[in-house]
Amino acid sequence: MQILAHELKHGHQYLMQEIDFDKSGRHAGFLYDITDEIAALNRQNLFSDDVGATIVHPAKYAASHYGDRKKGEWSFGTLFEGERNGYCRDNRYRMYQK
Ligand SMILES: [Zn+2]
């Protein structure tokens, strides 16, 4: 249940243009950053229980398991106009189109 909650959070992030995929559609894209993982870890913690489920410290867990991810909070909405134009023009990423 925790894994499902974690991955559904990523699905929501995709719909909100907070994460994306690369051109192949198989790997994380430009917008994916460590805060996306911290948010997903927080979500999975909500579904912990006393029967074998695990509560993790989101920031520490993300730092040790996703330390190579970009720092800061990247999403399409936080990009400057020029960055947005470049992002769309280059067509190197796959973002949910609202
Ligand atoms: Zn994740």
Image (tube, helix red, strand yellow):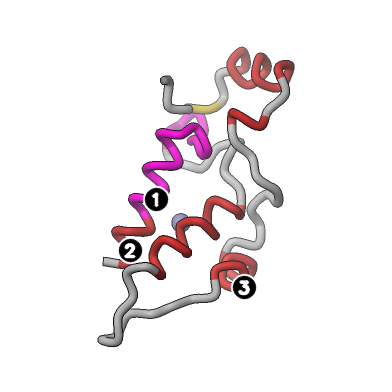
Name the secondary structure under disc 3.
Answer: helix
Image quarter where the C terminus lies is: top left
Callout 1: CB less than 8 Å from ligand 1: yes
Residue on which the image places disc 2: 3
Task: Identify the residue at image location x=32%, y=67%.
Answer: 2
Task: Identify the residue at image location x=38%, y=58%.
Answer: 6
Whole-angstrom CA distance, mark 3 to mark 2, is 18 Å
Mark 1 and mark 3 lie on one chain; the one further toward the N terminus is 1
Q: Is residue 61 magenta?
A: no
x, y percent for residue 11: 37, 43
Callout 3: CB less than 8 Å from ligand 1: no
Give the residues in magenta: 7-25
Residue on which the image places disc 1: 9
x, y percent for residue 61: 56, 71
Under mark 1, the amino acid is Lys
x, y percent for residue 87: 63, 21
Examine the rendered structure and indicate whether residue 21 appears above or below residue 50: above
Q: Is there a contact, CB below 8 Å, between mark 1 and mark 2?
A: no
Left or right relative to 52: residue 88: right
Task: Identify the residue at image location x=33%, y=75%.
Answer: 48
